[in-house]
Amino acid sequence: MSDSAKRSILAGLRWTSLRLRLLVVFALVALTAAVSASGIAYWLNREAVLTRTQDTALGDFRRQMQNRAAALPLRPTGDDLQDAAEQMATSGPGYHVLLIDTNDGKPIVGSSDIDSFTKVDVPASLQKQVNKKQPLTSTNTFEYHLFWQRTSIGGTPYLVAGTKIIGGGPAGYMLKSLDQERQDLNSLAWSLGIATALALVGSALLAQAASTTVLRPVQRLGDAARKLGEGKLDTRLVVSGTDELADLSRTFNRTASSLEKKVADMSAREEASRRFVADMSHELRTPLTAITAVAEVLEDEADSLDPMIAPAVHLVVSETRRLNDLVENLMEVTRFDAGTARLVVDTVDVADQVTACIDARAWLDAVDLDAERGMMVRLDPRRLDVILANLIGNALKHGGSPVRVAVRTDDDELVIEVRDHGPGIPEDVLPHVFDRFYKASASRPRSEGSGLGLSIALENAHIHGGDITAFNSPDGDGAVFVLRLPRDAERSADVPGDGDPDLHEEGGTQ
């Protein structure tokens, strides 16, 4: 999967996550508001329903006790209590009545429904309060009060109340079923629950609409930013409105325009610089050719010259060759920068190719080669020669002989390891060994190399689709350069094509 596809998937997940967070926040707010409103509404209706039923039943029971129970004889019989209880229950708003008195020290009871309401159904605490005389004060002129309590009998809610007739009358108790009220409140709870669910669904729909309105511009901005990051500097956003997102889009457009202009200016300057280096290199080749020819003639005659002049002749010849190598390297670097470097791929035996590179430079005595013959790969043999010449020459120059070159294959890769036995590369230099014109030490600003050898080697590896890494040997015995190239450069190289002018670099600088 490509990096752009991965970024698109991750961006989609982030966008979905933001949408989900908005939906969750809207839903939580709506749920909290709906549950709070429903809870308050249920509590208010519950208290109103129960209070109304309770007040009606208690008020009627109080009147019945005053009218009927108070009219009973001083020593009522069981039949008297039974008749009074039935009459009170018949005329009351659907409750049962229990009357309790004593006759000759024996308790007598009268119930409107002996199967539904007995003394056992009356809580003991309520009986105690009903039969307890209250002290008379300026604010309390009655010895007995009406007490009530909500209780549950057999899973059914009831209202139980009781009072006693002042002056020696019977004690009366009332049992009122609240089952109908419970059913009404349950229906109300279901209605409120449905209303809460509908509010939650409505809030989710509103959140969806709101998130779409907010996230669509954000998504467009994200897409535009990704395109800008991919190099499409002409990307712009269509701006509409005056809100914060519109201001952000305008800022993005201004930033993109400024970036496009700066990149265009930098590209123009880079192209001009590259053209200048290329033109300069081409212009230098003609006089360098003449100077080189003269220098070679002088070198041939150096032995017959005055001993005071001979060292100067040798210096001129050496520097002329160095300048010629530098111009050739600059031309090669210019080709890489301009993207005009091309591969000429051929099938070669790696062992033969490495041996030929070492033999051409008379390094056979200084290099220990470990390579099996018959290891065939498809690559550009000239560019491989340039890479090997730079790596081995660099190892011989800065590490000293013997230099060990090991060749092996790793799956679909060709791996060539160049190891020297020198002091290694300082840790602060390692990240810069492939930089152009980088010198490992300020104490030797001049060297035989051009300062471009390792950089050119790395570029030649890249054009094959490979790479070069440098590190110090774990045992502290020298530096190690590892070249990795695909075994078939035609399928892996980034820059296919035909060849370009020959270049041979016999060294480089760390």
Image (cartoon, rainbow, N blue to C red):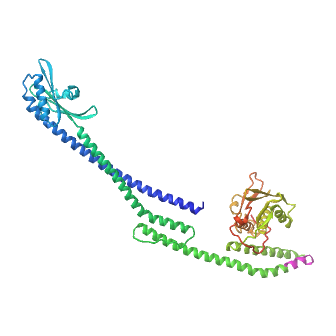
Q: Which residue is found at the position 23% from the left and 43% from the top?
A: 47
Front residue (pair 4, 462): 4
Q: Is residue 33 left or right of residue 286?
A: left
Q: Position of residue 260 (x, y in %)?
A: 55, 74
**Labels in figure, total:** 0
Q: Main secondary structure of the magenta part?
A: helix
| Residue segment shown in magenta | 295-306
Q: Position of residue 97 (x, y in %)?
A: 16, 30
Q: Position of residue 242 (x, y in %)?
A: 39, 70
Q: Is residue 30 left or right of residue 127?
A: right
Task: Decide if residue 407 is in sight here.
Answer: yes
Q: Quadrant of residue 326?
A: bottom right
Q: Which residue is found at the position 75% from the left and 70% from the top?
A: 344
Q: Is residue 133 above or below residue 313?
A: above
Q: Which residue is found at the position 30% from the left and 46% from the top?
A: 190
Q: Is residue 267 above or below residue 367?
A: below
Front residue (pair 389, 152): 152
Q: Quadrant of residue 273?
A: bottom right
> What quarter of the picture does the C terminus occupy?
bottom right
> What quarter of the picture does the N terminus occupy?
bottom right
Front residue (pair 34, 188): 188
Find the residue positioned furthest to the right.
Answer: 304
Q: Is residue 119 above or below residue 185?
A: above
Task: Decide if residue 423 is in sight here.
Answer: no
